[in-house]
Amino acid sequence: MIILGFESSCDETGVALVCTERGLLAHTLHSQVAMHAAYGGVVPELASRDHVRRVVPLTRQVLEQAETTLQEVGAIAYTAGPGLAGALLVGASVAQSLAWSLDLPAIPIHHLEGHLLSPRLATPCPEFPFVALLVSGGHTQLMRVDDVGQYTLLGETLDDAAGEAFDKTAKLLGLGYPGGPALAKLAEQGDATRIVLPRPMLHSHTLDFSFSGLKTAVLTRLKDAERQGQADAQMRADLAAATELAIVEVLVAKAATALEQTGLTRLVVAGGVGANRLLRQSLAKRLGKRKAEVFFPPLDLCTDNGAMIAFAAAQRVQRGLVDLAGQGHGFDVHPRWELAAL
Ligand code: KG4
Ligand code: ZN
């Protein structure tokens, strides 16, 4: 079965075609980063309006790329939450009306389920069970994943998400939006050992995280340096490197503890921060020593995209978790939605 999937939960419009037998056929993506950059963050109303503008052309494009017609599509998937209410409603209403007009089932998908199953689009594909480290702009969670739809929360952030910590620190350093890639780039010119920042909750004996204190520590260092006339380009690069290292060290340590506590040997990393090079290298190094395996989504599928939504729906269909005959076309979105509640 071919599934057409829509992602519109935040600032990326993604459309994809995934076949339950042949895998990913094609995906198209429009990022609104340039539009929101002027405001230093996502403006929800602008995001919704841009999704409206992009979704139909991207759908035409993805069908062309896969040399497929709407008549060959067997089901339509969309992100139903969590995310920005208005943005979610664009994808949900387009998917549901298209499904209604074509007499197809529509499948609502949890955005984080899309992220955490997306490493299964890569080769080698991680087998179940595994521990998932979900690190996006809004979430930092460790989950035990026993199968599609079987998720147990092991730990999560008590305040800021890892991506948020990157974004907020980047803002303090005067870097553009989104902050993660910008901070990582600046960190390449810095020395992470010159400034020591706290590793929040590193020794807390739980699998929870806390990143909100980090931005305060960075702000204090920056203000001190400014007062002493030392806040030059090198100091800012050192601070970026120290921030990146502090976040990465906590993520790596907690992920390793999660594997230890569950006795599992596979770690899957998903979400935008999964694109971070230092995180990828550090996890591979640390887990390699423990003879555990680490899996990442393909780099272009780390941040939000339609492929992960269509793919999550495909895996649900394959396991018989979707009632294809009983799907109506009324719909709702869930701006807040616990993955463990699935
Ligand atoms: O998963 P995602 O695309 O969107 C959400 O669902 O939130 O994640 C976006 C987050 C942002 O906070 C962004 O700064 C961060 O991922 N990010 C990175 C990198 N690329 C994206 N953080 C650190 N290093 C990167 N290379
Ligand atoms: Zn996301």
Image (spheres, helix red, strand yellow):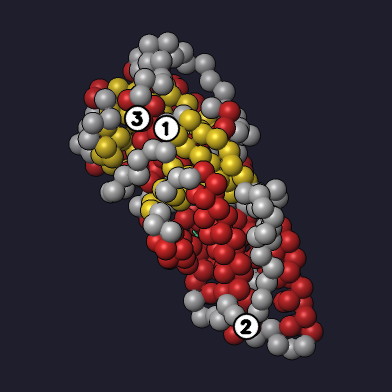
Mark 3 or 1: in front is 1
Q: In the shown orientation, is residue 339 left or right of residue 103?
A: right
Q: Nearer the viewer, residue 148 or 204?
A: 204
Measure how far apart labels 3 and 1 are at the Cα level: 14 Å
* Mark nearer the N terminus (3 vs 1): 1
Q: Nearer the viewer, residue 173 or 39?
A: 173
| As drawn, 325 above or below 140 | above
Residue at the image position 35 percent from the left and 52 percent from the top: 298
Give how far across and how far down residue 13 sits, in percent. Answer: 45, 43
The label number, if any, that marks residue 314 in the structure image? 3
Residue 332's image quarter? top right
Question: In the orientation shown, which residue stands out farthest toward the top?
Answer: 326
Give how far across and how far down residue 104 sits, in percent. Answer: 35, 17
Quarter of the picture holding the N terminus: top left
Q: Can residue 188 be seen by looking at this rendering?
A: yes
Q: Are marks 1 and 2 in contact (CB under 8 Å)?
A: no
